[in-house]
Image: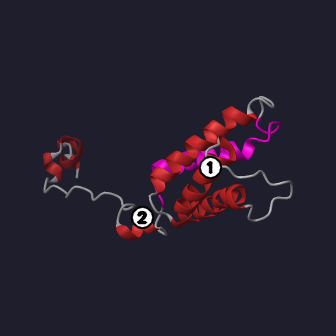
């Protein structure tokens, strides 16, 4: 399910970036002209397009998700918060969800269906080898004498 969540959210985020940069799919309202050296749609569109694609395929997911989460936090506090305090009223509820889903992906990683997993970056680290300690050597696991005598 982690991979499915990452793919769906990455695709939606990538679509936001494509619409800002290339006006694809065409916006229902008038498209804002794209200028790279502006915050919106310039840098925001670039981040959404590149990070959305990286998150979608699961490549460098943790870094891309960290950047995307930060961009969503900036978008909320730069644009949406001034409309209303409540995300449902200021149209920032999707921005808040993106922010926290991307923050989750920073810590959870890309999941098994990802390029990161294929190249080994997404794999969990190997556990240290088990020690050859016997249960009698560990005080918490050592049977008490009274239990042994009662048997």
- The correct choice, above or below, for 113 with respect to 80 in the image is below
Residue in view at x 20 percent, y 42 percent: 146
Within-10-Å neighbours for mark 1: few <14, some 14–19, many 20+: some
* Quadrant of the rendered image containing residue 19: bottom right
Pick whichever, 81 or 17, lies toward us.
17
Q: Residue at x 40, y 71 (%)?
A: 118
Q: What residue does disc 1 label?
A: 36
**Relative to 42, is 64 on the left or the right?**
left
- Measured in 3D between alpha carbons, the distance from the residue under mark 1 to the one under mark 2, in whole angstroms, is 29 Å
In which quarter of the view is residue 27 placed? bottom right
Image point (61%, 58%), residue name: 49
The residue at which mark 2 appears reads as: 116
Mark 1 residue element: loop
**Predominant SS of the magenta segment:** helix
Q: Is 44 in the magenta? A: no
Sequence-first tag of 1 and 2: 1
Whether residue 1 appears in this view of the structure is: no
Q: In this view, does 38 lie above or below 121?
A: above
Which image quadrant is residue 15 in? bottom right
Which mark lies nearer to you, 1 or 2? 1
Q: What stretch is highlighted in magenta?
A: 87-110
Q: In this view, does 34 lie to the left or right of 26?
A: left
**Circle 2: element type:** helix
Percent x, y of residue 32? 77, 51
- Screen quadrant of the N terminus: bottom right
Residue 38 location (% of width, % of height): 65, 42
Residue at (18, 41) in percent of width and height: 139
In the figure, is residue 49 to the left or right of 81?
A: left
Of 123 and 12, nearer the camera is: 12
């Amino acid at each position: 399910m982690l991979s499915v969540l990452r793919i769906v959210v990455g695709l939606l985020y990538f679509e936001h970036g494509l619409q800002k940069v290339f006006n694809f799919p065409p916006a229902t309202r008038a498209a804002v002209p794209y200028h790279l050296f502006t915050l919106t749609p310039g840098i925001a569109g670039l981040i959404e397009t590149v990070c959305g694609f990286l998150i979608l395929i699961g490549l460098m997911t943790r870094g891309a998700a960290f950047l995307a989460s930060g961009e969503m936090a900036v978008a909320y506090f730069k644009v949406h918060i001034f409309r209303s305090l409540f995300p449902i009223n200021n149209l920032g509820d999707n921005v808040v969800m993106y922010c926290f889903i991307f923050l989750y992906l920073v810590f959870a990683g890309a999941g098994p269906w990802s390029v990161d997993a294929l190249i080994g970056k997404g794999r969990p680290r190997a556990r240290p080898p088990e020690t050859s300690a016997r249960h009698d050597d560990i005080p918490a696991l050592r049977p008490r004498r009274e239990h042994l005598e009662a048997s």
